[in-house]
């Protein structure tokens, strides 16, 4: 083991140079004009995995390619088999003018590397590849088999991977899945995430007059769709932050004392959070701490709100329509289809007869929760502690990784979420970064993990 750790320590400058190469691909999955960049990035990954010593291939899909790389040879080794899942696609970098340096020209400043995709998810996933490289190049036997599944559509809903899993369930059958695409609360404070929130997405459109109207000639005698939408949305939440939709909280289990105590250990104060977010004040459901609110409570969020004239200056109209893009985050025991129905029924019920409401359904996924006391979870906690030198905390997080529910359903295996992202990493925001200490500790954690998991 010591030679693996030494290898990683001695090779950081080269590893960092390779990481920069990886970050230079503008692999933006949401934007069709980047299709070739995703393909080039996937090809680079395949070649890189082969150079490490893995057997790797590019799998075409209807969307962006999936990269599969494995330590396995054809004959069965009898060793445990673990999957490492990650994604090489990234969120759109816009608004570009808010980046200090261009998003696909990685810049190192102190112990941070700035680039789109640095923390979410290229850096976190690359750490695992470098740990395997260290085993191979030092001739240290791996106590397990590993297969990397690195996809190019996570940020747009993992459509192709879902079908790919079903088709390749035999090859991908495994004991546990390891994912580093989540966070840790502070530098050198590692965490095992044992729950993520689920999600439902939809768009509400309110239709009024058949066209935009002169507000002086007709205003006052016809419902304004933007006002109707505002009034409908205002009826969704009360002033204490509770969602008023009947049945919305159906099945939501109260947090146990143990969980609330774990959540209290999360080292980010309300004042620290307020400063980080740049908001005038914090706001959330009464009776829950901010950490509880953003990890363990369901939400109803307006992601986008559009109606009427958006250009410069004024235009006196009654708009023909108004639209809201909505996502609800869900917690364990909430069923996406049931919550979707409860939300739609309520919205339709409170919609006045003066306008017409249309609701278009988007993607959906259940929340994920796994026991933090299982043998693999305990092994992961030991690996985290060895790599970071501090006791890890257990936490629930508010983001979603829909494919991990499919892993459970199709492969029957649990996922260990071992994230290295920091709250100020700016994931999905301008000036995304990854901390290089997190990167190095992540490589070490991965090296320890295979030993600990295979022992348990
Ligand atoms: N890495 C995130 C998920 C995440 C973020 C988990 C923070 C835990 C903490 C992932 O890349 C992501 O952004 N997922 C989307 C899923 C959506 C598009 C269905 C999300 O959570 O919005
Ligand atoms: Zn993301």
Image (cartoon, rainbow, N blue to C red):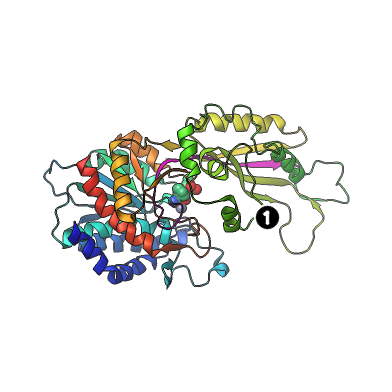
Neighbor class of circle 1 (other Cα within 10 Å; few <14, some 14-19, many 20+) is few
Which residue is at 60% across, 58% downward?
A: 275
Q: Residue 235 vs residue 130: left or right?
A: right
Cβ of mark 1 under 8 Å from ligand 1: the answer is no
Q: Nearer the viewer, residue 108 or 201?
A: 108
Q: Quadrant of the N terminus?
A: bottom left
Q: Is 16 placed left or right of 32 in the picture?
A: left
Residue 93 image point, x, y percent: 50, 63
Q: Name the residue tied to disc 1.
A: 280
Task: Specify whether 7 is left or right of 265.
Answer: left
Residue 90, placed above or below residue 207? below
| Viewer-nearest residue: 252 or 10 | 10
Q: Nearer the viewer, residue 185 or 58?
A: 185
Residue 312 seen in the current view: yes
Give x and y (percent) for residue 332.
47, 33
Give yes or no for residue 201 being in the magenta stretch: yes
The image quadrant of residue 46 is bottom left
Q: Does residue 429 sit above or below 357 in this rendering? A: below
Range of magenta residues: 184-210
Q: Is residue 227 magenta?
A: no
Please tell me which residue is depicted at 33% across the width and 50% down the height of the picture: 384
Location of residue 405 (image quadrant): top left
Please report the residue visible at 44 percent of the width from the left and 68 percent of the height from the top: 104
The secondary structure type at the circle numbered 1 is loop
* Residue 366 visible: no
Q: Residue at x 48, y 59 (%)?
A: 425
**Which image quarter: residue 311?**
bottom right
- Position of residue 269 measured from the top left corner of the image (x, y, whole percent): 55, 51
Does residue 129 sit above or below 451 in this rendering? below
């Amino acid at each position: 083991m010591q030679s693996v750790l030494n290898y990683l320590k001695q090779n950081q400058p080269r590893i960092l140079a390779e990481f920069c190469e990886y970050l230079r691909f503008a692999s933006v999955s949401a934007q069709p004009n980047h299709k070739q960049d995703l393909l080039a990035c996937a090809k680079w990954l395949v070649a890189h995995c082969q150079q490490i010593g893995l057997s790797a291939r590019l799998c075409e899909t209807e969307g962006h390619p999936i990269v599969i790389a494995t330590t396995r040879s054809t004959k069965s080794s009898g060793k445990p088999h673990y999957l490492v899942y990650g994604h090489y696609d990234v969120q759109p970098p816009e608004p570009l003018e808010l980046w200090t340096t261009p998003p696909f020209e990685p810049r190192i400043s102190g112990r941070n590397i700035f680039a789109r995709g640095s923390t979410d998810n290229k850096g976190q996933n690359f750490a695992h590849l470098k740990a395997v490289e260290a085993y191979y190049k030092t001739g240290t036997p791996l106590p397990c088999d590993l297969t990397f599944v690195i996809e190019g559509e996570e940020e747009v809903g993992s459509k192709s991977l879902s079908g790919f899993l079903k088709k390749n369930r035999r090859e991908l059958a495994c004991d546990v899945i390891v994912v580093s695409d989540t966070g840790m609360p502070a530098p050198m404070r590692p965490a095992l995430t044992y729950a993520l929130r689920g999600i439902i997405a939809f768009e509400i459109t309110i239709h009024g007059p058949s066209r935009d109207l002169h507000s002086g000639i007709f205003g006052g005698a016809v419902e304004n769709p933007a006002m109707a939408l505002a009034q409908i949305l205002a009826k969704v939440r009360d002033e204490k932050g509770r969602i008023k939709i009947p049945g919305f909280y159906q099945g939501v289990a109260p947090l146990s004392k143990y969980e609330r105590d774990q959540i209290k250990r999360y080292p980010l104060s309300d004042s620290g959070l307020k400063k980080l977010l740049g908001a005038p004040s914090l706001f959330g459901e009464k009776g829950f701490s901010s950490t509880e609110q953003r990890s363990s409570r369901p939400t109803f969020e307006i992601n986008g709100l559009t109606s009427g004239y958006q250009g410069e200056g004024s235009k006196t109209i009654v708009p023909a329509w108004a639209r809201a893009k909505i996502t609800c985050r869900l917690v364990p025991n909430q069923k996406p289809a049931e919550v979707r129905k409860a939300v739609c029924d309520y919205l339709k019920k409170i919609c006045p007869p003066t306008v017409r409401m249309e609701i278009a359904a988007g993607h959906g996924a259940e929340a994920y929760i796994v026991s933090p006391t299982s043998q693999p979870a305990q092994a992961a906690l030991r690996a985290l502690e060895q790599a970071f030198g501090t006791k890890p905390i257990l936490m629930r997080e508010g983001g979603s990784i829909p494919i991990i529910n499919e892993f459970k359903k199709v492969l029957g295996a649990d996922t260990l979420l071992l994230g290295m992202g920091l709250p100020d990493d700016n994931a999905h925001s301008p000036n995304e970064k990854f901390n290089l200490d997190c990167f190095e500790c992540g490589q070490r954690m991965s090296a320890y993990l295979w030993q600990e998991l295979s022992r348990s």
